[in-house]
């Protein structure tokens, strides 16, 4: 930060303060990102299977393992990947989508 307040710090020190983790004042939740992909039997010959990201929080984490056949209910949301400002506006709508999981059912392990 180029300002004097940032360089000098609020307490008048040299600005070499460090961040400390406050475990008592923090709330930690479980988070997992799943990569979902179509079954090979459902993909037409010569096409690439489609995939998407699924964000899982809380008790739904660690229910699914790689290779499981699952049904996931959730909310389909956009995720911004572009920076803000003129460059992002000039580039147009640049975002990806993900599914916020609400329920996971494992059919085959």
Image (cartoon, rainbow, N blue to C red):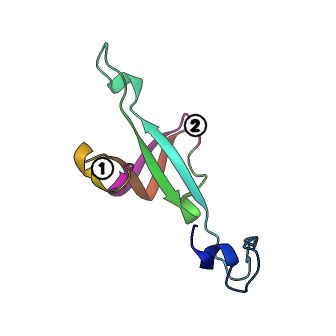
Position above or below: 76 against 70 = below
Between residue 93 and residue 54, name the one nearer to us: 93
- Whether residue 11 appears in magenta in the rendering, the answer is no
**Magenta-colored stretch includes residue 66:** yes
Corner quadrant of residue 101: bottom left
**In this rendering, the label closer to the viewer, 2 or 1:** 1
Label placed on residue 88? 1
Q: Secondary structure at mark 2?
A: loop
Circle 2 is placed at which residue position? 66
Image quadrant where one finds the C terminus:
top right
Going by the picture, which residue comes out furthest to the bottom? 11
Which secondary structure is most common in the magenta stretch?
strand
15, 41: nearer the viewer: 15
First in sequence: mark 2 vs mark 1: 2
> Which residue is found at the position 57% from the left and 53% from the top?
32
Q: Looking at the image, which residue is at 73% across and 84% down? A: 12
Mark 2 Cα within 10 Å, few/some/many (few <14, many 20+)?
A: few
Front in this rendered view, residue 85 or 78: 85
Residue at the (44%, 45%) spot, across then down:
53
How far apart marks 2 and 1 lie (CA) works out to 35 Å
The percent coordinates of residue 100 (x first, y second) are 41, 57
Secondary structure state at the residue bearing disc 1: helix
Q: Residue 70: x and y, percent?
A: 45, 43
């Amino acid at each position: 930060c180029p300002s004097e307040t940032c360089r000098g710090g609020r307490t008048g020190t040299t600005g070499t303060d460090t961040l400390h983790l406050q475990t008592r004042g923090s709330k930690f939740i479980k988070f997992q990102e799943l990569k979902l992909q179509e079954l090979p039997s459902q993909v037409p010959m010569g096409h690439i299977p489609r995939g998407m990201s699924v964000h899982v929080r809380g008790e739904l984490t660690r229910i699914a393992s790689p290779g499981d056949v699952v049904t996931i209910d959730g909310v389909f949301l956009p995720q911004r990947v572009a920076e803000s400002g003129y460059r992002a506006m000039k580039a147009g709508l640049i975002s990806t989508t993900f599914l916020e999981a609400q329920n996971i059912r494992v059919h085959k392990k």
